[in-house]
Image (spheres, grey):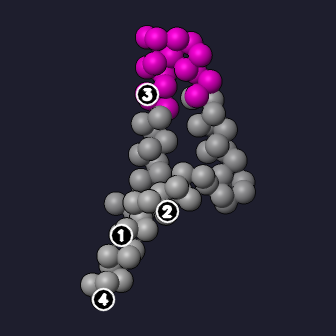
Amino acid sequence: MSLEHTIRVIAGTFILGSLALGYFVSPYWFLFTAFVGVNLIQSAFTKWCLMEDILKKTIFSRRTSSQEASA
């Protein structure tokens, strides 16, 4: 799965999870939903995404280093 698809899956999971938590646990979880939405809008304008940086330093850094070793 590509980096962009991974970010979309994570964002969707965060949104659906926080909506469920907001409905069943506490309405304060809707603030997390808003936080994710604001970050998506911000990344569209600035071309910077914190989740992208996190994934590049963790999961995707391992993928690129293992691909370079096999080449």
CA–CA distance between discs 1 and 4? 12 Å
CA–CA distance between discs 4 and 2? 21 Å
The main secondary structure of the magenta stretch is helix
Q: Which mark is residue 17?
A: 3
CA–CA distance between discs 3 and 2? 24 Å
What amino acid does circle 3 point to? Gly
What amino acid does circle 4 point to? Ala
The numbered mark, 2 or 1, whose residue comes first in the sequence reads 2
What amino acid does circle 2 point to? Lys
Task: Name the residue beneath numbered marker 4.
Answer: 71
Element type at mark 1 = helix
CA–CA distance between discs 3 and 1? 27 Å
As rendered, which of 28 and 44 lies closer to the eye?
28
The numbered mark, 3 or 4, whose residue comes first in the sequence reads 3
Q: Which mark is residue 57?
A: 2
Task: Name the residue beneath numbered marker 1.
Answer: 63
Number of the front mark, 3 or 1:
1
Quarter holding the C terminus is bottom left
What amino acid does circle 1 point to? Arg
**In the image, residue 45 lies at what x, y percent?**
72, 54
Side (left or right) of 9 relative to 27: left
- Residue at 67% across, 60% down: 47
Q: Residues within 10 Å of mark 1 (few under 14, many from 20)?
A: few
Would you say residue 21 sits in the magenta stretch? yes
As rendered, which of 51 and 33 lies closer to the eye?
51
Whether label 1 touches label 4, CB < 8 Å:
no
CA–CA distance between discs 3 and 4? 39 Å
**In the image, residue 57 lies at what x, y percent?**
49, 62
Residue lying farthest to the right in this orientation: 46
Element type at mark 4 = loop
Q: Residues within 10 Å of mark 2 (few under 14, many from 20)?
A: few
Quarter holding the N terminus is bottom left
